[in-house]
Each structure stands twice: as C-alpha cells, then as structure tokens.
C-alpha cells in the first residue's frame, strides 16, 4: 500500500492529474476517519478533511521521502486538527465528571412505540458509538489525537512521536495519561467493560430518544458511509479481556468510516479549475 502511494506521489509530481486524484482517493478515508474522531461531527470532519487534503496536494513537492508518505500525511493532518478552531461537538463536549452525572440521569425507560423493534439494535449501537466519541471529546486535543493514533489507528509510539513532532518518551507519557483518564471513567461507569456498572447502552437508548438527545431517523454514526460495519464484539469475547484490552476493543470496534463522496469531487473540481497555481501543470 505504502509503495503504491509513493509511486502515485512521484507520478503526481511529474504532472499526472490521474495519479493525483488516485492519491487523494487512497488517503481521504484515513484523513476523514481521523478528523471525525477528533471533531466528533461528520459535517465538521468533512470540512476539515477537505482542508487537509488541499494542504497535502499543495505541499506535495515538499515531500522528500524522509519518512513514509502516510506519516507525512498524518503530520499535516495532526497539525491542522490540533490548531483548527473548535467545532460544534467540541463546544458541546463536557468533562468526564459532568458526563458521569449525565449518564446517572439516564434511568431505564420503555422504548417509544415510534421506534420499531427491528430498528432498536441500531439505536443501541448508535448510543455506544456516540458515547465513545463523547469520551474522546473529554480529552484535550493533544491527548485525544495521541489516543486515536495509537488505540484506533494502531500507530506505534515511534511513528506517533514523528507525526506529532515530540519525543517517543513524551508520546508514551501522553498516551498513558489519555488511557488512564478513559479507563478510569469506563471502569466506573461502562457496562460493556464491567456488567455491574450502572451504564448500559440498552437502557440509555430509549432514554436518549424520549429526551430528544437522539433522533432514531437521523443516526450520525450507524447511518454513516463505511467499508466495514464494526460492531462484532460479543460479551463472551469481552469477558476474556482485561479492562485495558476491553477499552481498546470498544474503540477499535467502530465502523471503518469512509469520506463523503463530495471530498474527492470537490478536490477534483479544484484541480481541474486550476485556481491554484500548483495545479496548472497537471495533464
């Protein structure tokens, strides 16, 4: 995969529009997936992904193969996501303490008749996905991106340190703090980590609908474009894992989200319009 991308980079540098478009297509999903987990809302993630893709293609000439191309791309994406203005979900995010208080209000209730039984499992899964996204937003941006890179994208401490331009020791320390914050919260509250805990997605789901915190006709995450559904974890499997492994498994179990079609379409239009000087020599 990496060698294919670097071949496309070389062809794009030589002026191939087709190679540039293929290159964007090859990296857009991972950029969008990172943006979605950092910003928490699909529309904001789409905007950020397009901004990052434009930075990548306009800086392509500066890629000197001193690192893997994907590392270079992640570095551009990380810098953008760490410095971009706060978006909708971040402005609505709450601390872990406030989050715990909110979950304590989500008492078990009956499903509204408006939600057919066949659709309820999707709503329960949406609660799980929304909750883990909410936990990510409870971290500050540096801890959040470190946790996402390592726990969800399986990036090593060495590569992660290169992406964030910090030492491996500093990266591991930041990752440890992020893990501790999320693990402490989940060990105390999450029923998927410990069945004796008070919060269970099956109980929160009908409460979320009744209080209009969630719209069953507009599910942000379970209704999202994806290559892979995720959501295959069973309680039997989780019971075989220790608490840290369970926590990581729940985050990795998210669907493999794909970027909206407009990401590539908008960039293609920009390339073909030649409104940016770097695109003028493409053929």
Image: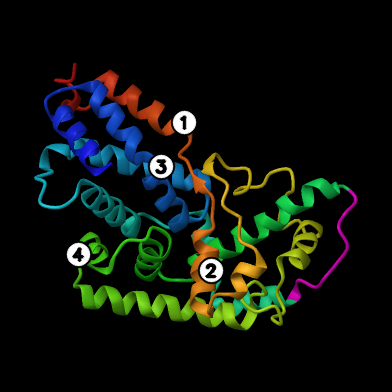
Task: Say whether disc 4 or disc 3 marks the residue closer to the N-terminus.
Answer: 3
Using the rendered view, name the quadrant where residue 57 is placed.
top left
- 268 versus 122 height, above or below: above
Which residue does the numbered mark 2 point to in the structure image? 135
State which region is magenta: 105-113
Specify whether residue 48 is in view.
no
First in residue order: circle 2 vs circle 1: 2
SS under mark 2: helix
Residue 107, magenta (yes or no): yes
Depth order, front residue of 86/18: 18
Q: CA distance from mark 2 to mark 4?
A: 25 Å
Tell me which numbered mark, 3 or 2, is placed earlier along the sequence.
Answer: 3
* Location of residue 66 in the rendering, given as x and y in whole percent from the top left corner: 10, 51
Tell me what residue is drawn at x 24 percent, y 41 percent: 56
Cα distance in 3D space between marks 1 and 4: 32 Å
Task: Name the secondary structure under disc 1.
Answer: helix
Please state which of the two labelled residues, at mark 3 or mark 1, is closer to the viewer: 3
Q: Quadrant of the C terminus?
A: top left
Residue corresponding to mark 3: 29
Question: Between disc 2 and disc 4, whose residue precedes?
Answer: 2
The earlier-in-sequence mark between 1 and 4 is 4
Is label 4 in contact with label 3 (beta carbons under 8 Å)?
no
């Amino acid at each position: 995969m990496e060698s294919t991308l670097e071949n496309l980079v070389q062809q794009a540098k030589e002026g191939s529009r087709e190679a540039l478009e293929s290159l964007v297509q090859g990296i857009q999903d991972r950029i969008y997936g990172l943006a979605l987990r950092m910003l928490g809302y699909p529309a904001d993630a789409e905007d950020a992904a397009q901004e990052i893709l434009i930075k990548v293609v306009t800086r392509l000439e500066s890629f000197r193969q001193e690192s893997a191309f994907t590392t270079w791309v992640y570095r551009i994406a990380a810098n953008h996501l760490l410095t971009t203005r706060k978006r909708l979900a971040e402005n609505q995010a709450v601390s872990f303490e406030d989050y715990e208080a909110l979950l304590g209000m989500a008492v078990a209730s009956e499903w509204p008749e408006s939600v057919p039984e066949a659709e309820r499992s999707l709503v329960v899964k949406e609660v799980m996905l929304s909750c883990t996204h909410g936990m990510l937003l409870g971290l500050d941006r540096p801890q959040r991106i470190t946790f996402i890179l390592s726990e969800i994208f399986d990036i090593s401490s060495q590569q992660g340190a290169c992406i964030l331009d910090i030492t491996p020791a500093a990266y591991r320390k930041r990752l440890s703090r992020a893990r501790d914050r999320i693990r402490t919260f989940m060990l105390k509250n999450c029923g998927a980590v410990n069945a004796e805990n008070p919060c269970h997605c099956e109980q929160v789901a009908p409460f979320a609908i009744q209080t209009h915190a969630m719209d069953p006709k507009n599910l942000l995450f379970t209704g999202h474009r994806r290559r892979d559904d995720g959501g295959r974890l069973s309680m039997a499997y989780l019971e075989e894992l220790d608490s840290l492994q369970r926590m990581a498994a729940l985050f990795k179990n998210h669907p493999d989200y794909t970027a909206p079609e407009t990401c590539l379409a908008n960039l293609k239009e920009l390339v073909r319009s030649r409104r940016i000087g770097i695109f003028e020599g493409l053929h």
